[in-house]
Amino acid sequence: MQENNTKRLDEIKDQVLHCTQCPLHKHRIHAVFGEGPYDAPIFIIGEAPGAKEDETGRPFVGRAGKLIDELLQEYGLSRNKNVFISNIVKCRPPKNRVPDKKEVNLCFSYIEKQIALINPGILVLLGATALKSFTGTHEKITNVRGKWWKEDGRVIIPTYHPAAVFRNPAYRKFIKQDIQTISDQYQAW
Ligand code: URA
């Protein structure tokens, strides 16, 4: 990783932590930048911080985070080694509602810059908000998960948000299949 990229990412982190671009900042305890190696080959994108993430300033530390960490670990993947994990929106929406279009648009340049600087080979979109914000598609996640495609030299892999497993336990096996795809692409990368 170039020293300059590390410096740029630290600058963006500082901007995120002090961001007041949208009203979500008024209710936050912490904005959540994301975590993982700055040269991670795999970049996972969720929706927005929840209560635990807002409290700690770290992404995916609640129930959904524990599940995704556990599933990644089975394939030797982790945010300590090869995965950077962040969200489309960096501040928690009230009552964990889905971030609206304006909030997504105002926050989007942060994730764009993070992706450009970390430059991962594999981009994983967790759930509908990440899929829609990133691709602009109105396709349902159910219709696109299990598929992957290449864009700007990166492999894009959409899958269910891990929180969906708590509503529908059958989704666990689909997320596992998609993590197998991530692992296969990582081996080939
Ligand atoms: N859900 C998300 O989408 N992101 C988090 O950081 C936590 C839960």
Image (tube, rainbow, N blue to C red):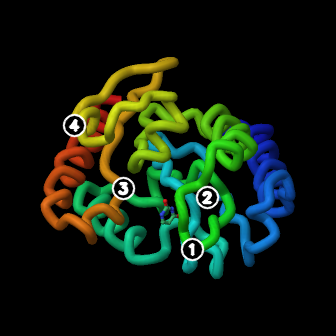
Is 134 on the left-hand or right-hand side of 77?
right
Which label's residue is closer to the chain start, 2 or 4? 2
Residue type at numbered disc 2: Gly
Residue type at numbered disc 1: Lys
Q: Position of residue 142 (x, y in %)?
A: 25, 41
| Above or below 115: residue 23 | below
Q: Are marks 2 and 1 in contact (CB under 8 Å)?
A: no
Q: Position of residue 137 (x, y in %)?
A: 44, 28
- Tell me what residue is drawn at x 48 percent, y 46 percent: 129
Q: Which residue is mark 1?
A: 95
Q: Which residue is mark 4?
A: 146
The secondary element bearing badge 3 is classed as loop
Q: How many marks?
A: 4
Q: Which residue is mark 3?
A: 161
- Marks 2 and 4, how far apart in space? 25 Å
Front residue (pair 73, 33): 33
Which label's residue is closer to the chain start, 1 or 3? 1
Name the image quarter holding residue 71.
Answer: bottom left
User: Is disc 2 surrounded by few (<14), some (14 to 19) or many (20+) residues within 10 Å?
Assistant: many
- Marks 2 and 1, how far apart in space? 21 Å
The secondary element bearing badge 1 is classed as helix
- Marks 4 and 1, how far apart in space? 30 Å
- Tell me what residue is drawn at x 76 percent, y 41 percent: 3
For ligand 1, tell me if the residue under mark 3 lies within 8 Å: yes
- Marks 4 and 3, how far apart in space? 13 Å
Which label's residue is closer to the chain start, 3 or 2? 2
Q: Which mark is residue 34?
A: 2
